[in-house]
């Protein structure tokens, strides 16, 4: 997404130069949810690599700490279409052109707190690039579900998936997909 730098253009015009400034200066956000730190780790790498701001999606009521309870609650939420309430997102979220969305894979798809974010409508009109960490099952339906859930968003389904803390290829993917999405 190429946007013209208005003030620079004004200055160039005032100074009588024919300088037209076109920079790929898309404002980028990395939004993520993470229960045990794997997706947080990946999100921090994506943000650093793409010079983006970071936003952690947080639940109003945190998940239980026991794995068995987490699994059961997540399953219930997915089966019953429950969207757990999340804390407010950044006030300036409308300023972002591109939003990377990071999630752990839960039951083969995006975690329910991320589903709350994706279905909220706040990402409408934005480029959305998903990435996930998983426990060996891969991305499964995560990326196609992101496209289904994020109504009116321009979802790049060429997401990145990594096993646990393994971040193989993540930097390259983040850079290339941002460039591709904004050119
Ligand atoms: C509720 C729940 C459901 C999960 N479902 C899957 C799954 O379907 N496939 C998979 O590969 N891993 C699954 N996992 C493992 C996580 O995706 C994996 O550990 C992930 O890296 C955790 O990310 P986090 O540390 O950011 O929370 C599940 C974990 C939890 C807690």
Image (cartoon, rainbow, N blue to C red):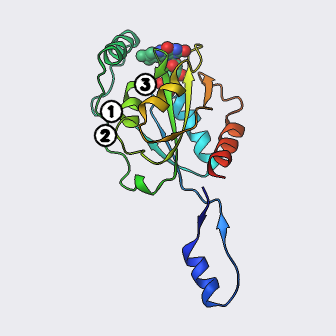
Q: CA distance from mark 3 to mark 2?
A: 15 Å
Helix, strand or loop under label 2? loop
Residue behind label 2 places its C-beta within 8 angstroms of ligand 1:
no
Q: Which image quarter: residue 3?
A: bottom right
Q: Residue at x 58, y 13 (%)?
A: 137
Labels 1 & 2 near each other (Cβ < 8 A): yes
| Quadrant location of the N terminus in the rendered image | bottom right
First in sequence, mark 1 or 3: give its number: 1
> Mark on residue 111?
3
User: Which residue extends farthest front?
Assistant: 152
On screen, residue 59 versus residue 12, left or right, reads: left
In this rendering, the label closer to the viewer, 3 or 2:
3
Q: Residue at x 58, y 32 (%)?
A: 157
Q: Residue at x 55, y 74 (%)?
A: 6
Mark 1 nearby-residue class (10 Å; few <14, some 14–19, many ≥20): some
Q: CA distance from mark 1 to mark 3?
A: 12 Å
Establish if 111 lies above or below 2: above
Name the residue that disc number 1 marks.
Answer: 59
Mark 2 nearby-residue class (10 Å; few <14, some 14–19, many ≥20): few
């Amino acid at each position: 997404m190429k946007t013209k730098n208005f003030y620079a253009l004004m200055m160039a015009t005032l100074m009588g130069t024919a300088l037209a400034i076109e920079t790929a200066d898309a404002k980028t956000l990395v939004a993520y949810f993470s229960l045990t730190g794997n997706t947080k780790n990946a999100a921090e790498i994506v943000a650093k690599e793409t010079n983006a701001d970071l936003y952690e999606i947080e639940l109003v009521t945190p998940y239980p700490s026991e794995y068995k309870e987490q699994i059961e609650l997540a399953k219930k939420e997915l089966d019953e279409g429950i969207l757990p309430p999340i804390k407010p997102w950044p006030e300036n979220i409308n300023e972002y052109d591109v939003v990377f969305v990071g999630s752990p894979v839960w039951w083969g798809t995006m975690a329910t707190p991320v589903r709350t974010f994706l279905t909220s409508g706040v990402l409408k009109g934005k480029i959305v690039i998903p990435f996930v960490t998983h426990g060996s099952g891969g991305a499964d339906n995560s990326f196609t579900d992101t496209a289904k859930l994020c109504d009116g968003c321009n979802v790049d389904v060429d997401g990145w998936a990594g096993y646990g803390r393994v971040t193989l290829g993540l930097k390259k993917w983040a850079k290339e997909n941002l460039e591709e999405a904004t050119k």
